[in-house]
Image: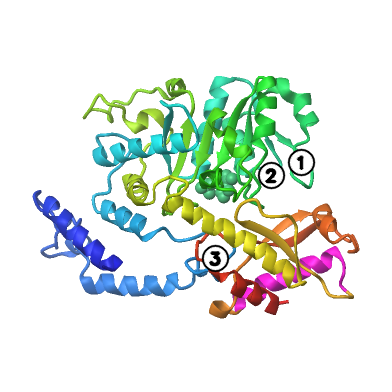
Amino acid sequence: MNRLALLTQALSSLQSWLNRFPGSDGGAAVQPGESGDADQLHRQPSSGEMETVLTELVRRLEGNYPFHSPVYAGQMLKPPHELAWLAHSLTMLINPNNHALDGGPPTSVMEKEVIPQFARMFGFTEPVLGHLTSSGTIANLEALWVARNVHPGKGIAFSDQAHYTHERMCSVLGIPSFKISTTPAGEWNLHELESIKDRVGTVVVTMGTTGAGRVEPLHELLPLFREMGLRVHLDAAYGGYFKLLEGTGAIDPLPWGWTGEADSLVIDPHKHGLQPYGCGCVLFRDPAVGRYYKHDSPYTYFSSDDLHLGEISLECSRAGAAAAGLWATLQVFGLEPMGRMGQVMQYCRKAAVRFADAAVATGRFVMLEAPELDIVVYAGVPEVGARTLRGVSAVSERVFRRGMERGADGVYVSLYTVPASQVLNVMPDLQPDAETVTVLRSVLMKPEHRDFVPELVRRLESLL
Ligand SMILES: Cc1ncc(COP(=O)(O)O)c(C=O)c1O
């Protein structure tokens, strides 16, 4: 059965529940007006009008880059799995709100069911406190807000590889932030942290950096941070699902072995977890931090004495459909290393390894580093006469623009700015005429990328 047939079938089953209530006409509460301008304004749009708008929408949507296709190997973008799409769309017909059990009883239960699955995956000892959020940004904001409450007056430290959201959210929260520099290989300059440790309460470790997909060495850092008396928050918004590959030999297992020791963790199901946007997740190892969320609401929590998710989250309204999409996906894909989700991650990881081998084999590209997950950072070798750092940037810009111009026959990559030293490391003979260099970056986060790699590299080479 195709996805439309599945949706139609599920819609008609749900319709019989909807029909048991008055005014059930497919979600349109407003009935056609009888006469007069005021009524006309509120008139139910005709199917003709809706069709016209949808036709125009399709025309506009075609202005997107082809995020669904493996020719798109640019940023962290891909459509959700169709099961998530179906579950999400179906639930939207009711539009429950997971802020409170009053707003979405079944989808709140689904959310409460998925949280322990993530907790177990990361090795947190249950019970934990956790919930979904609308994004990785909000999930991290909550973790930093809890960090501030646990250590009032103290700041947050993170490496210069961390997502910019940490610095920004510290400023939102009015707490000091400390950016620790790293070596070109990504090692933390720990003496910097040592010198300010009395002013720090929590350190953020990124498991899958946004730029290069690096996994910061938690196995080395966490014991040191504990000795310094610091809390540890893991930003696994991007890399979290790679935990499934810990025991498979496909990635370095060492950092992943320590995730269960962290105080809090963020993972984004709307990145690798096959979900539409609007699905982040935050977990806290100590459920007692729930006390910081305590608030009174004279209008919200009446239908049940059970925990309402709004009582343990900073956001109020939140899509119950996001929980339904994730719950449905986990029913089929699971979170087991050898299960379907593990396979998805294997494919992405293999795509990156194959890409690195194939790109280097052309002799026209150089990898800036071996990929740790499924993000590759590379540069085109500049021609004789342009063997400078600026020459490398010019090649990157050319590949980026020409690839897009070719549309379906092209390739969509992203650009990434790195310090000159990172390029000189791999091409030491280049003239150092710039402090930073624009290089190429590809996020190979679609399983389809694995088999498309030879064609991807062929297309890239043709752009040089
Ligand atoms: C490591 C990391 N943290 C946080 C974020 C922010 O997440 P979101 O875009 O879901 O708000 C991102 C996004 O790319 C990320 O890669």
Percent of width and height locating residue 32: 14, 63
How far apart are the alpha carbons under marks 1 and 2?
8 Å
The reply to whether the residue tagged 1 has its Cβ within 8 angstroms of ligand 1 is no
Helix, strand or loop at mark 1: loop
Q: Nearer the viewer, residue 374 or 153?
A: 374
Q: Residue at coordinates 48% horizontally, 56% vertically from top-left?
A: 344
Q: Earlier in the sequence, mark 2 or mark 3?
A: 2
Under mark 2, the amino acid is Gln
Magenta part of the chain: 386-405
The residue at which mark 1 appears reads as 182
Position of 409 with respect to 48 (left or right) is: right
Q: Quick check: can you spot residue 386?
A: yes
Residue 449 tag number: 3
Percent of width and height locating residue 153: 63, 20
Under mark 3, the amino acid is His
Q: Determine whether 15 is above or below 198 in the image.
A: below
Position of 82 with respect to 172 (left or right) is: left
Q: Determine whether 178 is above or below 351 in the image.
A: above
Under mark 1, the amino acid is Thr
Helix, strand or loop at mark 2: loop
Which quarter of the rendering shows the N terminus?
bottom left
The residue at which mark 2 appears reads as 161
Q: Earlier in the sequence, mark 3 or mark 1?
A: 1
How far apart are the alpha carbons under marks 3 and 1?
31 Å
